[in-house]
C-alpha cells in the first residue's frame, strides 16, 4: 500500500488539519506494515499558482518548451506522479473563508490535466485516477457541517470524483475556534471518527 498525505494548511506548525491527517496516516501504517508513505506539505513546499506562464507552458508541445517552461511543467508532473502512485490519499483541509486554502487549490490545479488524470469521451468526462481511497480531514473554526455554508465537502467530493476518486470519506473537526472546551471536544470527536473509519 502506498499512502500519500497532503497537508494544505498555510501553517507549518500548529495545524489541526495536518495533525489529524498525520493520525490517519499513522493508523494506516500500523495496519499495513509494508506500506510506503509520502508527505506533500504545501506550506513548506508551496505549489505555484496556475498563471498565464504556466498555462503557456502546459499548452506548448513538450519538444518546443523553453527550459523555463519545461521546469514549470515538471513541478506539476511530480505532483501527478505522487497521486498516480498512491493507493490511499489523506488530505488535511482547513476551512479558510468558507472554502479550501489557496495551497490546496494550487495542488488541485496542478493534478488536473486532460488526457493524464481525466479525459472527455462521447459519454462525458472520465476520471483516470480510479481505484484509490481518499480520506479528507476537514477542520473548521465554526460549525458548518450539513449547512449551506459547507462549500468544502461538496466541492472536494465533486472534484475528486471528476478525477475518478469516488471512494472518499470525510472526517470533521468543527468548533475549533469556539473556546478551549469546544476545541478539545472537536479534536476528540475527530479522533473517534478516524478510529471508526479505520476500524
Image (spheres, helix red, strand yellow):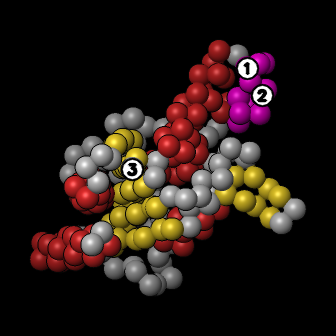
Which badge, 1 or 2, is on the more N-terminal residue?
A: 2
**Horizontal arrangement in the rendering, residue 154 relative to residue 143 (left or right):** right
Q: Which residue is mark 1?
A: 65
Tell me residue 127's x, y (percent).
67, 57
Instruction: Using the rendered image of the protein, determine whether residue 158 is visible from the camera's viewpoint.
Output: yes
Camera-side residue of 187 and 182 = 187
Tell me residue 197's x, y (percent).
32, 73
**Which is in the foreground here, disc 3 or disc 2?**
3
Tell me residue 176's x, y (percent).
24, 70
Residue 131, quarter of picture = bottom right
Residue 65, quarter of picture = top right
Camera-side residue of 179 and 77 = 77
Give, as a single range, the part of the protein colored magenta.
55-65
Picture layout, residue 193 above or below residue 121? below
Question: Contact (CB < 8 A) between labels 3 and 2?
Answer: no
Furthest residue in direction front, as rendered: 34
Which badge, 3 or 1, is on the more N-terminal residue?
A: 3
Res 60 label:
2
Which secondary structure, mark 3? loop
Q: Which residue is mark 3?
A: 1
Q: Residue at x 54, y 73 (%)?
A: 154
Picture layout, residue 104 above or below residue 157? above
Question: Contact (CB < 8 A) between labels 1 and 2?
Answer: yes
* Label 3 to label 2: alpha-carbon separation: 35 Å
Which secondary structure, mark 1? loop
Which badge, 3 or 2, is on the more N-terminal residue?
A: 3
**Which is in the foreground here, disc 3 or disc 1?**
3
* Label 3 Cα neighbours within 10 Å, binned few <14 / some 14-19 / many ≥20: some
Instruction: Using the rendered image of the protein, determine whether residue 140 is visible from the camera's viewpoint.
Output: no
Amino acid at each position: 500500500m502506498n499512502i500519500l498525505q497532503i497537508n494544505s494548511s498555510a501553517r507549518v506548525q500548529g495545524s489541526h488539519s495536518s495533525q489529524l491527517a498525520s493520525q490517519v496516516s499513522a493508523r494506516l501504517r500500523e495496519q499495513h506494515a509494508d506500506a510506503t508513505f509520502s508527505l506533500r506539505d504545501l506550506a513548506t513546499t508551496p505549489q505555484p499558482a496556475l498563471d498565464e506562464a504556466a498555462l503557456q507552458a502546459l499548452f506548448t508541445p513538450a519538444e518546443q518548451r523553453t527550459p523555463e517552461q519545461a521546469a514549470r511543467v515538471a513541478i506539476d508532473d511530480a505532483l501527478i506522479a505522487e497521486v498516480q502512485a498512491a493507493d490511499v490519499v489523506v488530505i488535511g483541509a482547513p476551512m479558510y473563508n468558507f472554502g479550501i486554502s489557496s495551497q490546496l487549490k494550487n495542488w488541485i490545479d496542478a493534478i488536473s490535466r486532460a488526457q493524464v488524470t481525466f479525459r472527455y469521451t462521447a459519454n462525458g468526462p472520465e476520471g483516470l485516477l480510479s481505484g484509490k481511497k481518499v480520506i479528507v480531514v476537514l477542520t473548521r473554526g465554526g460549525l458548518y457541517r450539513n449547512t449551506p455554508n459547507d462549500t468544502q465537502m461538496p466541492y472536494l467530493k465533486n472534484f475528486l470524483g471528476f478525477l475518478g476518486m469516488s471512494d472518499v470519506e470525510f472526517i470533521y473537526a468543527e468548533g475549533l475556534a469556539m473556546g478551549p472546551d469546544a476545541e478539545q471536544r472537536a479534536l476528540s470527536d475527530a479522533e473517534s471518527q478516524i478510529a471508526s473509519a479505520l476500524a
